Amino acid sequence: MAFNSLEYGIFLVVVFLFYWLLARTGTLRIVFLLVASWVFYAASNPYFLFLIIGSTVTDYVAGWQMTRHDDRPGYRRLWLIISLIVNLGLLGVFKYSNFFYESFVNVANTMGADLTFTRLDILLPAGISFYTFQTMSYSIDVYRRKCPAELNFTRFAFFVGYFPQLVAGPIVRAVDFLPQIGKRPYFTTQQASRALWLIAIGLFKKVAIADYLGVNLVERAFDTPDVLSSMDVLLGLYGYTMQMYMDFSAYTDIAIGSALLFGFHLPDNFDRPYKATSVQDFWRRWHKTLGSWLRDYLYYPLGGGQVSPLKVYRNLFITFLLIGLWHGADWTYVIYGALHASAMIINRMLRKRRDRLGIKLKLDWWGVSWRVFLTLHFVMFARILFRAGIEAQKPGGDPFGKVDAVLSALGQGTYDSVTVMTPLLWALLIGSYLWHWTPRAWTEATFTGFRRMPAYAQGVLVGVALLLVALIASGRPIPFQYFRF
């Protein structure tokens, strides 16, 4: 049930109405939302519901046992290990089985074996990369005594399965979300305005920008780079870079807006990432909940930046290799992570060198501009690997062949010819970057103007926007890009 579908709109309205009718009933309203969330998840494949319930039960029992035996460190550690094995096992089986199997076959064949790789017919459950990280963070926080165990199973299951953030995040921490469940729900006109605004903006980003750029520019540049000019392919890369942001941030906007309709607050996931002045700054702005998760549960436990320089570089490399592998089960994603790790290491080395020499970095408008330019283009060209990884999901796909085809097209030197662009594509591509680079205060000022409008005017404006979105879509909804990961 995609956020950009009519089915989701009907589902959201029905659940919203029944939830607020049950708002004064305490536990019943949470039970209702939990069942609705499981229905939402089962719509993609009913069998996947058993996986999320299994993960939920495992981590609920782990948290309960760690609290019950608070004075037995070894027993607590055992239940933490059980939680990690179950969650990482689910990821390993359903997401990485073919990757590890194929890698083993390739290594064995280089050593003289004569093995044949046959892809295992395993479906990737929707959202498994997100909800397993969410439940693991709960178990780790309970073990560290940073979060009390939730002994009410219904509340814990609701934390894991709450439908707005279930499939593609943002990754929610138990310490932030569980306290919200017990509070008495309330609904204000400002809250309603914010929710409708976010949902409308998200749908516009997804349908009018991300999908249009994807179908009319990006797919052409990546599917047939050999018949396009270098400029066409380069513009396709600019389009893909913006498509990924608009698509993923649109999901986050709709998720936050949908959750807000029920009185729950989800964390923001983006902060204009293409305004970043370094790769480090980019990862502070892009998919913030994943970055903070890996920082707190992997990078810091390895020693973070408080160890010797070589160990710091090792920690960065391990963290970003896992960021790459988290996105997809293919070597293109591993190399993608390694590229970002290398950039982070170089960035740190240069910063430490300036500190040793006592050089104070003063960024004027020119200094900021060229740093933004370099960071954007590093991210953009690294995404050739990211996009090629999608090729690995196709039968007989050749991801590295796709990388070679795109790089060859860029290197042929035909930058004086543009054949794929139309006036509307130019307007969307340039306009989306300009919108992205505007100050956040401008967007907030626009929302303030919307919020001050009468309720009927807000409804009419959102209704017209949704109608335009429906007309632009005019067909089967295109899945969100991060559903692949």
Image (spheres, helix red, strand yellow):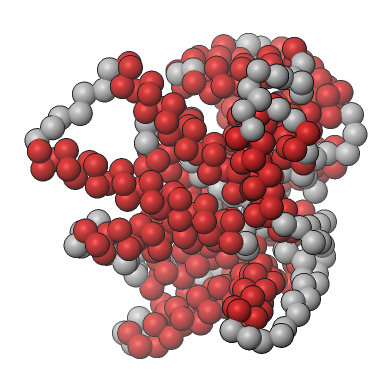
Does 326 appear above or below 433? below
Q: In front: 241, or 25?
A: 241
Residue 350 falls in which quadrant of the image?
A: top left
Considering every residue shown, the one lying at the far front of the view is 412
Q: Quadrant of residue 370?
A: top left
Q: Nearer the viewer, residue 306 or 5?
A: 306
> Where does the image place residue 59, in percent across and percent down from the top left?
54, 73
- From this viewpoint, which residue is outermost toward the right? 475
Q: Residue at x 31, y 22 (%)?
A: 367
- The picture places residue 368, in percent across and down from the top left corner, at 34, 23
Location of the C terminus (image quadrant):
bottom right
User: Where 289 falls versus 219 (above or below)?
Assistant: below
Query: Can I make out residue 310 in this image?
Result: yes
State the residue at coordinates (76%, 80%): 116
Q: Give whichever of 336, 24 is nearer the camera.
A: 336
Residue 392 x/y as whole percent: 71, 58
Horizontal side of 431 relative to 48 (left or right) equals left
Q: Is residue 254 visible?
A: no
Q: Is residue 26 above or below residue 240?
A: below
**Residue nearest the viewer, comparing 472 with 422:** 422
Q: Find residue 151 and report its horizontal and vertical position in percent.
A: 51, 71
The residue drawn where x is 65% and y is 70% is 99
Q: How many marks?
A: 0
Q: Quadrant of residue 51?
A: bottom right
Residue at left 19%, top 45%? 352
